[in-house]
Amino acid sequence: MRVLSLRLKEIEIRGFRSFTSPKKIDLDFDVIVLTGGVGSGKSSLLSAIEYALFGTTFEVKERKSIRLDDLVNDFEKEIDIKLKLVDDSGNTYEIERSKPRSKRGRLKIITNGEEYYGKNCEELLLKILNGMTYEDFIRYVFVRQEILEALIYGPPMRRSEALDRLFGISALEEAFRGIPIGDVEEKIDELNLKKSTLENIIKQYGTPDEIEERIARRLEEIEKIKKRREEIEREVKKLEERYKQLREIEEKHKTLTIELAKNEAIVDNLRKEIDKMKTTIGEVTKEEILLTASELKERISDLLVEFLRGKEAEEIKGFEVKDEQMLGEFIEKIQKAIEILEDIRSEYEYELSALNERIISSREVVSRLKNKLSALLLEIDELKRKKEEYDELLLKYGTPKTISKKLDKLKEELKKSETIGAEEKALLEVLKRTIKELTLKGEIECPICERKMRKEDYNAKLNARVEKLSRKMIESDKRTPQLRSEIEKLSEALNKIRALEGELVDYQFKQRELEILQDEVKKEEEKYYSLLETVEEAKERVERLTRALRAIRRNVELIKGYYELKKKERELRTYERRVKEIRKAFSKLEYSPEKVHNIVQRLGELKVALSQCDREITQLENSVNELKNVKGKVEEAYREFKEINRKIKALERLRDRLITIKNLFRSIQRDVRKKILEKLVPIVNDVFKKIYPYEDYEKLDIKVETKRTSEGYERSVYTIYAKRSIDGEWVPVLNRMSDGQKVLVALALIIAFSNLRPRGVSILIMDEPIPNIDANCRKAIVKTLSSAPGIKQLIIATQNPEYEDIVKVGVKKYGIRGRIYRLHYKGREGTVVEVAL
Amino acid sequence: MASSTVEKRKGEIIDIVEEVRRLISERIKDKETLEFALKIFEKFYHSGSKAAKEYIREILERVERGESVEFEA
């Protein structure tokens, strides 16, 4: 299938953006102008063509401002667009695209009555479009306002980007900028760092073979040490056996040493003891001792006889001490005899003690009796004195009876004396009072005889009477104390006599008692002296026995000392012999501490060597294990190192390739740009002359300069120049021209560029392309475009209604097939398309 | 889109893609680098910068993982 120049014939839109119910629009015209206000659906219609051809739109693919689902009208479930195309040969192609919400879109192509679906459809469509890709479409066919704006108003970089995009070489610029050499180098650096770490590990431990060699060397060393260890162990075993023997000998040696020391000490002690004993007992001969023993035997025997122990005496006497060997037995016998004698002495002492007690008791009795006697004698002396006193009292006062009679008389006399005195006193008082009264009255009756008397007479009589009474009273007063004194004296004498009589009653009895007591004292004293004699005798015997025993003991001690001395001497000889024997045994033992010391020292050295061997083996084994681990690590590191090296090389290759490609892209971009500009600039001038109907600028040119961007790389920057007619100067368009002139320059560029596109697609779609230009220019543009050799069909979407007039004039004057559609948005009904021409 | 599937467009004055491809092929002698360069260009041209960068990053990761990379234009 060969497709040449294509035109749009018809489009039917449903559910796409502002379009709801199906709208069929005839597109089979040379010039179509879509007019309408903001949101009326002009751009939606143009996007519907774009979507039908490529299944996407500029907003979705390039701007990425919306998703495909956002293209589906809110009141419809799916998009359904049918676009008919026709080529120069009259072949029609019906492209149907549908896309339910949230589902993938479908494509169907009907050509010459045949329907095509699925994957092959896209390929077929590409063929129908003469290989025009989406990128070609947005560059050559669909000119958006923003491209014009970028060309007219954009800063140098943006303008250059827009032009590169228009020329189709922006991909090379993006590739140049986007190829991440830095990332690759970063990875290479990372890997180099890892590599260096691994290199260090390998450098540190060596290669696996080197490590293996080290392991082998260490294993050999272990074997050697083990052999050395075995030899040492054998020697240790031998030495231990020898040491065991020596230990036994040493034990014996020690025992003998102790024994020797003990025996020597005993010998030494015995010698000292013997010396001491000799000093104690002095120089005595055997004969002297035997004689002493014999004498002692006689003495003891006599004593035993004396104290009535004949049997024991016989036994002692019968024992004959023939030599000093018998002294021990003799001493024993003597000791027994001494014990007997000691018992006897004890008995005597006991008796003596009993006698002493009796003496003490007798002495106490005598003393008591004497005390009693003394007391009785004192008592009798007192009674004697009282008897004499009694006799004297009797002699002086008479018997108690006589005294009693005298007393009665005196008492009676005293009584009388006291009575008379009282009467006289009373009378005297009366008389005195009477006299006093009479003295006052002068004459008075006698109180006694009641006869009248003369006062003076009466006074004289009374006074005489008073004088008489007073004398009597004085006499009476003198006699009464005498009487009382006598009575008292006699009463005392009587009492004393009577008391003495009572005390003297047992005077006789006491005298008798004194006689009895004196006899008793005499008897007790006799008894006491008899006891004293007995005690003296007993004492003498005890003392004699004690003296004898002391002498016996002295002799026994002598004999005993002698006997002990001889015994010790014998013992000394025994120990001296033992010492000699031990010394002999020592020499037989052949014991030498140096030998033991040497063996112990050697054993110690060997044990140290053994533990050294063990340590070395452990260290080497650890080292082997460590080396095995290290080997594993190193092998791993080595593998990793190789791998990293390989990766680094691959990455370096990649980096080199990317650098090559990057630089290549930049040079290709430069060359392609140059080639495009060489072809484009003349066409731009042709187009500019047609669409710019004035004479002030006669020619345009595009120059490329290299500038460094803020990111630090070089960028080609386009500058458009215009040749000014008045002075022939090339001036920068953007700095010198008006906005309208700039729009025309940009449009000239676009139209010219569309002439460089593949001939097969002869459509130009422009969305709000030409603001700020006057009517002359607009007419010139439409005329130029409609007559341009590569453009068969022109669709302009604009808000400017003046374009309607241009189309109308074009249709009328130049026979252009034109159509004007007015678009309105009517809510749920969506975009409504009205044919205005 | 493989170049072989596209019929050569007739009558065009300049075909940028073809021109770039021609220049790349002319200037790179190493087959692998050539294929890689063409692939990168295709990616940048048709799939956009993001996809192209993603592609290169993928290649980089594969190389980093030690996998073999074949460049097919």
Image (spheres, coloured by chain):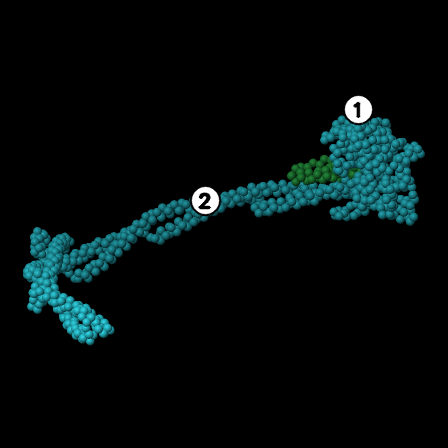
Is residue A201 visible to the viewer in this orientation of the structure?
yes
Asked if the residues shown at circle 2 and circle 1 are in contact, with their CB atoms under 8 angstroms apart, the answer is: no
x and y percentages locating residue A627 in the rendered image: 53, 44
Answer with left or right where residue A400 lies relative to residue A24.
left
Q: Amino acid at mark 2?
A: Lys
x and y percentages locating residue B3 in the rendered image: 77, 33
Q: Can you name the residue that lies furthest to the front here?
A: A452
Which is closer to the viewer, label 2 or label 1? 1
Residue ID at (31%, 49%): A251
Residue ID at (84%, 35%): A36
- Which chain is tinted green? B
Answer with left or right where residue A110 lies relative to residue A336.
right
Q: Nearer the viewer, residue A438 or A641?
A: A438
x and y percentages locating residue A252 in the rendered image: 30, 50
Mark 2 Cα shell of 10 Å, populated few (<14), some (14-19), many (≥20): some
* Total residue callouts: 2
Host chain of mark 2 = A
The label shown at residue A226 is 2
Q: Nearer the viewer, residue A130 or A698?
A: A698
| A427 versus A181 height, above or below | below
* Distance Cα–Cα, label 2 vs label 1: 95 Å
The label shown at residue A114 is 1
Answer with left or right where residue A548 lies relative to residue A683.
left
Q: Amino acid at mark 1?
A: Glu
- Which chain is tinted cyan? A
| A330 versus A463 height, above or below | above
The answer to which image quadrant residue A837 occupies is top right
